[in-house]
Image: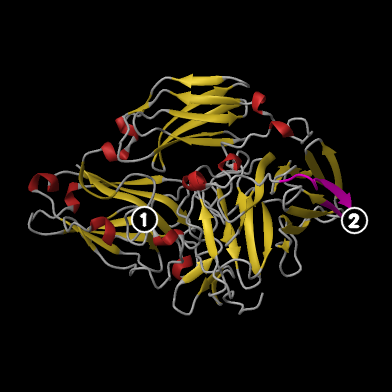
Amino acid sequence: MSGSANRPVRRRTFVLGGAAAAGSAALPATASAAGFGWRDDGSHYVVDTGAQLVFKVSKSNGDLTSLVYRGTEYQGYGGRNSHIESGLGSSAVSIRQSGSTILVSVTYGTLKHYYAARSGENNIYLWTNKADTSVSATRYIVRVKAGLFRNDQPDSYTYAPTAIEASDVFRKSDGQTRSKHYARLRVMDYSYVGWSAGQVGLWMVRSNHEKASGGPFYRSLLRHQSADGGGLYEILYYGQNQTEAERFGLQGPYVIAFTDGGAPSSSLFPGTLTTPWADSLGLLGYVPASGRGRVAGVGISGRDTAYPYTVGLANSAAQYWGSARAADGYFSVGGVLPGTYTLTVHKGELAVLTTSVSVSAGGTTTLNTLAVPSSNDPADANAIWRIGDWNGTPGGFKNADLMTYAHPSDVRAAAWTGNVVIGSGSETSAFPCYLWKDVNSGILVYFRLTAAQAAAAHTLRIGVTTAYADGRPQVTVNDTWTSAVPAPPTQPNTRSLTNGSYRGNNHTFTYSVPASAWRTDTGQYNVLRIDIVSGSGSTGYLSAGTSIDAIDLLA
């Protein structure tokens, strides 16, 4: 196909899919399985699904070297294949057919990787078992030829020739920013990612992420596209702004799916996909449905019905989550490996209740109504004033939505500076979602107190969702009282605020402000100054910083 490097000749559609799109899903192709089978061409195992997909796996290293759908090659750019991480190197690769399933097995040290094809389907099912840290395997990437799909989304590079940070964040000539990190979505928000171009859709349907880390609200790169080509990712473990230790074991299946341009079938989605046909394949670490359990909760009381609630299960071996029903808080989390888990109830993204639950194979652990104590939800405390909502996110603050798909320097961002007046009606929308030592430290909040309020000491709270380079707030009231420098809470030690993620460890800083700090003239404004302090960080948007959840002064 001819055309410039920046734009193909024909118009094509670029899609990020989520569970909400399941209703329009196209079923897997099953028109014909006449050609189903495999052959050895000397260097590759060549698998024909008997539908419209033929793929090749290298016999030397397990790379996926060809993806031919309806006669068109989709695999590869820059001479690179699709594979685990950046390629495993010399591996033991074998193939066998079991009825209507063909399985290719790859062994590289302690790592096992599998490709499976089903007769009559345009899908490739993948599993990866990383046993330990001796092998680097943080992702599977499907590399796609350039020019096959439109390229104009936040995670695209083509229109952004100027690198502005770490060689993976770019600025376009119009001032907008692009990066493969900028996909907007949390893990729980999507079931698949990919592209659609006329009569062809190419998708990566994610696994249930039980062996990944970071929980339901985690954000990581999902896809990229540049002048060289595109990539679809299944992240096995991602270190950027990571809040948990790496988990090991079998992850999958995740699915490379071709369609006639529509979304992949909802039958492939995590939580929906069943693979009884894989029970007898001998996949290392595979646990069939019969070896898993379920946790179901009658409901959750003490909820703030203005917010969604999510229930998460986690231990060192696995993680799961499910949404609580808006009406009563009922929840059900299935497909859980046997074990004891910490169950966490989240209001938005803020943990408001934790307990322990045990799961057994083939059983359902039923929980009575879980009660969220009012003391666990900071929003229940009586406040003189409050900026933002206690929900574990910077939602509602200035630039908050933009920061999930753009760099802070993006031309679309409102000024990061500017002070706030309590009672103006725009306290939250005027307050920046992020504060940096080198950008907007020293922001001022103006507020009045009654005589009775000014006569008493009060607690000031600042909730944060993550921090970069140990950035934390120190406060000064009326230039007469300054708090001590608080200790830095445990936070990820990588980039966060500049790569589309505010998700770290929620933490609340509290400051006991004495009565002597307040102005006694009720007609005068009190002035709160918030400075970001740290001995770490660089300059500008990579200086020490933090993301704001809520700020309030308690009565």
Residue 313 or residue 244, whichever sits in front:
313
Residue at image point 36% right, 62% down: 399
Residue 221 or residue 152, whichever sits in front:
152
Q: Which residues are magenta?
A: 32-46
- Residue 41 is labelled as 2
Residue at image point 23% right, 57% down: 427
Asked if residue 109 lies left or right of residue 419, the reply is: right
How far across and how far down the image is residue 76, in percent?
72, 64
How far across and how far down the image is residue 431, in percent?
29, 60
Up the image or down, 98 lies above or below 481; here it is above
Is residue 350 in sight in this rendering? yes
Callout 1: SS: strand
Q: What coloring was used for the rendering? A: secondary structure
- Residue 473 is labelled as 1
How far across and how far down the image is residue 473, in percent?
36, 55
Name the N-terminal-most of marks 2 and 1: 2
Tell me, yes or no, whether the highlighted magenta stretch contains residue 37: yes
Up the image or down, 415 lies above or below 231; here it is below
Tell me which amino acid carries mark 1: Pro
Asked if residue 23 lies left or right of residue 425, the reply is: right
Q: Quadrant of the N terminus?
A: bottom right
How far across and how far down the image is residue 147, in percent?
63, 70
Within 10 Å of the Cα at label 1, are there few (<14), some (14-19), or many (20+) other Cα atoms?
many
Quadrant in which residue 437 is drawn:
bottom left
Within 10 Å of the Cα at label 2, are there few (<14), some (14-19), or many (20+) other Cα atoms?
few
Tell me which amino acid carries mark 2: Asp
Callout 2: SS: loop
Is residue 481 in sight in this rendering? no
The CA distance from mark 2 to mark 1 is 63 Å
Q: Nearer the viewer, mark 2 or mark 1?
A: 2
Asked if residue 490 lies left or right of residue 113, the reply is: left
Q: Quadrant of the C terminus?
A: top left
